[in-house]
Amino acid sequence: MDWDNLRYFLELARAGTLVGAARRLAVDHTTVARRLQALEKQVGAALFAREAGGHRLTEAGRALLPQVEAMEAAFLAVENAAPGVRQGLHGLVRIGTTEGFGNLILAPQLARFALSHPGLVVDLLALPRLVHLSRREADIVISLERPARGAVLVVKLTDYVLQLYGARSYLERYAPICTADDLRGHTFISYVDDLLFSKELQILDELHRPAHFALRSTSILAQYEAARAGAGLAVLPAFVAAQDPSLIPVLPGVARFQRTFWMSMPGDNKHVARMQATWAFLREAVAAKQGLLLPQINTISSIAACAYPIRANAIFHLIFNLLQPKSC
């Protein structure tokens, strides 16, 4: 049986579409289709069901998949063990994670990693949805929930903080927010409930049930931009919003939440040099960002957020009155 045909089968199983598999293999999609037809002719069975959204494994395809994955793992183990076959890291590593974390934390670090390893290609899937390790959508997945089962290597990558924020332009229009009860009547920005990809994102329920939303989006970056524009209050990761001077923490210490990122990969990947190196680099790179991921509560900001908005003339009159000599 032709190993190349099996390799094309494997990539199509992982990508789910001819175009996706072709992109991973750096070939035309007609080549993938032709290889698949040749393999199906060899095994005497249809391996995929063609559907509108792509290709789905048939029962015969599901039976073949673990055998081909085992062949791939054996091949990679031999390749990595062979001295002098290739120098340095090479090949493709695909990393799947959430949109905000991928774009703002990982992308700059992975760019540096890729520059250090010119033989390596890094795919970063930074998506507002769950990337499935079980479907081999990625080699390494960073998720909000710990994988429950399977032959998977899992580590806790990091905790991170989320906080309720409001733009100065929004907060100036309302009375100070000093307790959770003061959130009544405020407008919020959040996720689309029925499209949430993790229960860990149901954060507002822990604080307040909003009566009105200005905008709901599957994208945390869209929520951030809407909050910056003054559309309402939003719970945002500190690594997204804390360094933006236009956003003010609201109820620090109360409207402050902590979540965890878990990193996982198939157990058979741990013997592959490029996977080992990428795994170790991600742990090191994220550890260096703890100040951004887990910022300390700023007491001054907390006081300011409750007192906000105090107009400049009110401050002037307060200081003026305090400095006046008291009559006997």
Image: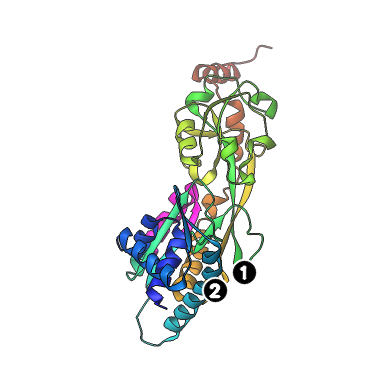
Q: What residue type is labelled 2?
A: Asp
How packed is label 1: few (under 14 Cα within 10 Å), some, or many (20 or more)?
few
Mark 2 vs 1: CB contact within 8 A: yes
For this rendering, which residue is in front, 321 or 207? 207
For this rendering, which residue is in front, 174 or 139? 139
* The C terminus lies in quadrant: top right
Q: Which amino acid does label 1 sit on?
A: Ala
Identify the magenta region.
95-113
- Which residue is tagged 2? 268
Element at label 1:
loop
Using residue 303 as the reference point, say whether residue 43 is left or right of it.
left
Picture residue at 61% right of the left edge, 43% below the top? 201
Q: Can you tell which mark lies on residue 170?
A: none
Magenta part, dominant SS: helix
Q: Please say if 311 is above or below 77.
A: above
Picture residue at 47% right of the left edge, 31% below the top? 226
- Which residue is tagged 1? 151
Residue 244 in view, yes or no: no
